[in-house]
Image (tube, rainbow, N blue to C red):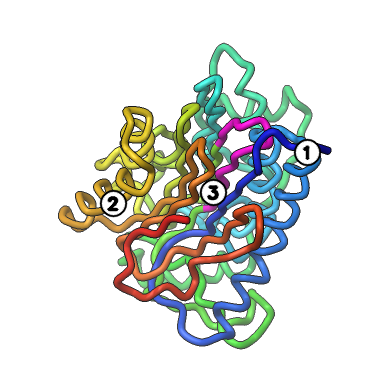
Amino acid sequence: MELDVQPKVIIHGGAGSSLHGKGGVEAVRRSLYPVIEDVYALLLEGKSACEAVVRGCQMLEDDPLFNAGTGSVLQSDGQIRMSAALMDGIAQRFSGTINVSRVQHPIELALYLQNSPDRVLSDFGAAELLRELQLPSYDPITERRLNEWLQERQENFTKTMAAVVAEVGVGDDADTAVVDTSARRGTIGVVVLDSQGKLASGTSTGGKGFERIGRVSDSAMPAGNYATAHAAVSCTGIGEDIIDECLAARIVVRVTDGMSLLDAMQRSFTEASDRQRDLGAIALDASGAIAWGKTSDVILAAFHNGDRIGDTLELPVGTQVGCI
C-alpha cells in the first residue's frame, strides 16, 4: 500500500548501568529486534499508531528479561502490582492502570480505557475491569523474580528497589544468566509514528521492586508517558525522578511550543542531569525525528527509521542525548 508518511518506531526496555560484553548486548538485541520488526510490519500494513504501540508493549510485557508484565518485580509484601499507560497523540487522550495484579498485559486495560469516561483506574477498579472484560487471571511471577525477593527478605529489605535491568551474561537463558546487581530499574515503552502521521506512546512497568505497598509509578502518569500531535515520549528510570522532572510532558510541551525535538531533549536532560536524576526517555516527533536520552550509563532502546533497525546499546557512557 502507498504510505502518506514513512512510519517510525522506537522502543525501550529500561535504562541502567553499562552492559559489559557482547553476550549482554546480543541478548538484549534478541529481545528488542523482533518487537521492532513486528511493530514496523503492522505500520506498513496501515495499522494505527495506538494499535502498533499496544502490540509492541504486549510483546515486551511477555519477555521476562524486562520488568513489565511477565517478569515484573515483587513488592515488599511479595505481590506483583503493575502499571501501564497509553496516549493517543492526535486525540491527546491519556489512559492508564495503576497497581493491577493477575493480568498478562496491563497495556490492554489502558487500551480499553481510551474510550471510557473514567480513563485511569487503580488496583481495585482495575481488578473489577478485568472481570468485566472476562480476561483470564494470569500469574506474571517468574522464578528469578521470586528468588530476588526471597534473597532480599533474608536481608530484611535493605535495598530501596530491585536490580531489575538485567545485564545478561553469555548464557542465552534469561533465568540462568548473570545479573548485574548495580543495574537500575526497568520499564518498557513504545513510541510510534504511523503512516497517517499520527503519534502514540505506551509505557508499562512492574515498579521498583520491594517498594512500599501503594507506591505509584510514573508510568501511569503524563510525567512518564505523554503525546500530542507534535511529539510523543516514553520514560524509564527511577519513577520519583521522572515525576519530579515531569519529563515526558516537559519534552512534549517544548516540542509542541516550537522547539526542535533534539533541543527539547538536550535542554530537558541537561536540567535533569544538573539535579542528579536517574532516568531515560525515547521520543518521536511529527516530522519523523527519532530521539533518546539518558542520565544513566545506558538506555536499552532500539528503533526503525524507515531504512534500517538500530539501537542505543553501545553508545559511549557519557552520551546523554541522540537524534536521527
- Give the camera-side residue of 56 and 131: 56
What residue is drawn where x is 37% and y is 60%? Answer: 161
Circle 3 residue: 189
Tell me if label 2 and label 3 are in contact, CB under 8 Å: no
Q: Is residue 208 left or right of residue 106?
A: left
Query: What secondary structure is marked by label 2?
Result: helix
Q: Is residue 10 left or right of residue 45?
A: left
Mark 2: give few (<14), some (14-19) or many (20+) Cα within 10 Å: some
| Viewer-nearest of discs 1 and 3 | 3
Q: Which residues are magenta?
A: 188-200
Say which label, 1 or 2, has the lower sequence index: 1
* C-alpha span from label 1 to label 3: 24 Å
Circle 2 residue: 266
Answer above or below: position of 289 versus 164.
above
What residue is drawn where x is 16% and y is 53%? Answer: 275
Residue 149 placement (x, y as % from top left): 49, 65
Circle 1 residue: 136
Looking at the rendered structure, the number of numbered marks drawn on it comes to 3
